[in-house]
Image (cartoon, rainbow, N blue to C red):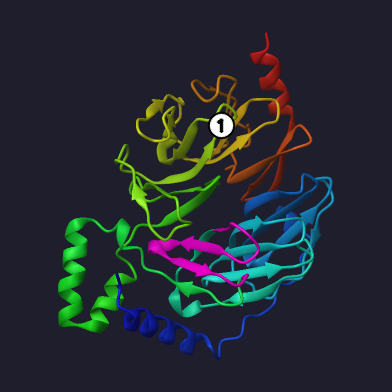
C-alpha cells in the first residue's frame, strides 16, 4: 500500500501548481457537431450527449438537431457518463472532471489539473455519491461525495512483480524519483464496465481486470493479447466481449476464465461495442470498420463505410447507430438496414 505521505505530496504538488490556472470556457461553435467527437451516451433512452475537442458537449433528442452546452473548459473531452437523467459527468485532458445537474445543458468543473499532463478516459458512478475516473498511465481518482472532492489512488494490483520491487527500492532511495516513476509506470486504463456488483476494466498491454469492491482491489485476468483493449461489455446472452487493437475481439462464455479469439477479418482497431435492441451486436472501428453479429458475437460480417472515417464510439438510438468520429456525428442508418436485411436472407 502506498504511504499516505506519498499520495499527499503528489496531490499537493498537482493542486498547488494548478491552483492559479483557471480554465477558459468552451466557445460556442456553429459546426461543433461536425468537429472531432470522442464519446457519446444515451440518457434515459431519450437524450443523446456527445463530447469532444475544445470542450465541446452536445445534446440532442432526435440525433438531428444538436445544442451546444455551456462548458467551463476548452480541454478535449474523452468520456461521458450519466447516472440518471439529470446527473452526469465528463472527463478529458488536463485530468478534467466536469459535472452537470440539469441533464447536460450546463456543466461545472470538479477537477482541472493541467500540471498532470495526463488525460482521463472514462468515468463511472455506482450511486449519486461514489464514483471513479480512470485514464492514462494508471490515473485513478475516486470520490465519495458526488465529486466535490476527488482523491488519487495508486493501484499496486496492476504492477508487474519486477516493477513493484523496483518501486520499493526507489522509494527508499529517492522519494522524488519514486513519485515521478510511480506517475508513469502503470498502463493506460481505457474503459470501465459495471455488471451488477462486478466492475470490469480494460486497458493497455492486454489489461483485463475485475473488482467486486468498486475498484478498491483488483483481480487481473491472464494475458490473452499483448495489445490494448478499448471496450468491454456483456452481450445480450450474458457473455463477455472485449475489443481492441488490430481488429482483436475476444469472447468469454465463463466470465473471463477462458477466452475465444473471434475472427473479424480486419486489422483496424475496434473502438466500441454497441448492443442493439434487435439482438444484434455492432463493432465500430477505425478506417470505417463496421461489423455486425447476429449470433452473440461468435461470428461477424463486415460492411465497411465508404468514406473510411473512424467510428470512435456509438449508441443504439431509435433503430439506428449514432456514432461519433473525427468529422462529428454520424448516423449509420443505411448500413444497419442493409446489413440486417442481408443477414435475414
Q: Quadrant of residue 196?
A: top right
Q: Which residues are magenta?
A: 123-146
For the point 70% across and 30% down, which residue is it? 277
Q: The N terminus is located in which quarter?
A: bottom left
When the figure is inspected, residue 52 is found, relative to residue 206, above or below; the finding is below
When the figure is inspected, residue 13 is found, relative to residue 163, above or below; the finding is below
Instruction: Please indicate whether residue 345 sits to the left or right of residue 12 in the image.
Output: right
**Residue 133: horizontal and vertical position, in percent?**
52, 63
Looking at the image, the residue that sits furthest to the top is 345
**Residue 155: horizontal and vertical position, in percent?**
35, 63
**Residue 328: horizontal and vertical position, in percent?**
68, 51
- Report the front residue among 17 and 157: 157
For the point 56% across and 77% down, which residue is it? 149
Q: Secondary structure at mark 1?
A: loop
Instruction: Please indicate whether residue 13 sits to the left or right of residue 176 in the image.
Output: right
Q: Is residue 56 magenta?
A: no
Amino acid at each position: 500500500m502506498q504511504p499516505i505521505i506519498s499520495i499527499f505530496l503528489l496531490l499537493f504538488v498537482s493542486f498547488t501548481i494548478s491552483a492559479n490556472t483557471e480554465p477558459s470556457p468552451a466557445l460556442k461553435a456553429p459546426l461543433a457537431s461536425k468537429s472531432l467527437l470522442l464519446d457519446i451516451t444515451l440518457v434515459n433512452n431519450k437524450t443523446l450527449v456527445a463530447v469532444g475537442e475544445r470542450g465541446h458537449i452536445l445534446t440532442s433528442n432526435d440525433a438531428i438537431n444538436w445544442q451546444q452546452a455551456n462548458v467551463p473548459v476548452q480541454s478535449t473531452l474523452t468520456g461521458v457518463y450519466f447516472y440518471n437523467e439529470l446527473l452526469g459527468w465528463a472527463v478529458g485532458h488536463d485530468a478534467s472532471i466536469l459535472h452537470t445537474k440539469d441533464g447536460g445543458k450546463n456543466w461545472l468543473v470538479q477537477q482541472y489539473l493541467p500540471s498532470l499532463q495526463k488525460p482521463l478516459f472514462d468515468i463511472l458512478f455506482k450511486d449519486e455519491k461514489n464514483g471513479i475516473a480512470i485514464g492514462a498511465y494508471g490515473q485513478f481518482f475516486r470520490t465519495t461525495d458526488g465529486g466535490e472532492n476527488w482523491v488519487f489512488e495508486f493501484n499496486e494490483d496492476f504492477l508487474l512483480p519486477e516493477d513493484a520491487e523496483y518501486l520499493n527500492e526507489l522509494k527508499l532511495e529517492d522519494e522524488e524519483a519514486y513519485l515521478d516513476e510511480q506517475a508513469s509506470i502503470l498502463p493506460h486504463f481505457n474503459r470501465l464496465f459495471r455488471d451488477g456488483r462486478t466492475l470490469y476494466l480494460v486497458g493497455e498491454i492486454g489489461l483485463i481486470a475485475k473488482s467486486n469492491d468498486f475498484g478498491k482491489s483488483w483481480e487481473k485476468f491472464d494475458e490473452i493479447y499483448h495489445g490494448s483493449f478499448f471496450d468491454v461489455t456483456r452481450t445480450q446472452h450474458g457473455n463477455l466481449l472485449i475489443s481492441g487493437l488490430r481488429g482483436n475481439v475476444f469472447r468469454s462464455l465463463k466470465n473471463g476464465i477462458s477466452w475465444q479469439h473471434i475472427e473479424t477479418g480486419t486489422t483496424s482497431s475496434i473502438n466500441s461495442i454497441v448492443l442493439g435492441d434487435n439482438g444484434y451486436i455492432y463493432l465500430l472501428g477505425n478506417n470505417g470498420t463496421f461489423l455486425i453479429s447476429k449470433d452473440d458475437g461468435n461470428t461477424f460480417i463486415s460492411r465497411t463505410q465508404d468514406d473510411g472515417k473512424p467510428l470512435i464510439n456509438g449508441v443504439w438510438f431509435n433503430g439506428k447507430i449514432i456514432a461519433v468520429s473525427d468529422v462529428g456525428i454520424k448516423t449509420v442508418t443505411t448500413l444497419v438496414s442493409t446489413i440486417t436485411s442481408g443477414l435475414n436472407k
